[in-house]
Image (cartoon, helix red, strand yellow):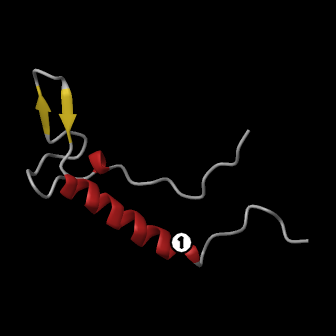
């Protein structure tokens, strides 16, 4: 079994969309004829920014997964 990640990425769907104001947990739009759920790129970029900031804060705090010898 592989090791668990030290960090879980933020899903764009958990954020409110800055473009259309779709609430957390809701998609931005649905293309009914195709059945495709749309999430605006602004929402994806917001989640990415939050991921980068969170990883930066954790970088100095993480404890190594392997014990020191």
Q: What element carries label 1?
A: helix
Residue drawn at the location 35% of the way across and 61% of the way down: 48
Residue drawn at the location 18% of the way across and 49% of the way down: 40
Q: Which of 31 and 56 is in front in this view?
A: 31
The reply, left or right, for residue 11 in relation to residue 27 is right
Residue with the most extreme top position: 33
Q: Mark 1 points at which residue?
A: 58
Residue with the most extreme bottom position: 60
Residue drawn at the location 39% of the way across and 54% of the way down: 10
Q: How many marks?
A: 1
How far across and how far down the image is residue 50, in percent? Answer: 35, 65
Q: How packed is label 1: few (under 14 Cα within 10 Å), some, or many (20 or more)?
A: few
The reply, left or right, for residue 68 in relation to residue 37 is right
How far across and how far down the image is residue 32, in percent? Answer: 10, 23
Location of residue 42 with respect to 68 vertically, above or below: above
Q: In which quarter of the image is the N terminus?
A: top right
Residue drawn at the location 23% of the way across and 46% of the way down: 24
Image quarter for residue 39? top left
Residue with the most extreme front position: 34
Q: Quadrant of the C terminus?
A: bottom right
Image quarter for residue 63? bottom right
Image quarter for residue 61? bottom right
Location of residue 12 with respect to 64 vertically, above or below: above
């Amino acid at each position: 079994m592989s090791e668990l990640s030290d960090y879980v990425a933020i899903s764009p769907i958990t954020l409110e969309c800055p473009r259309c104001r779709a609430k957390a947990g809701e998609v931005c739009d649905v293309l009914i004829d195709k059945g495709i759920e749309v999430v605006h790129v602004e929402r994806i970029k917001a989640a990415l920014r939050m991921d980068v900031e969170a990883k930066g804060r954790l970088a100095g705090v993480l404890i190594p997964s392997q014990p020191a010898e």
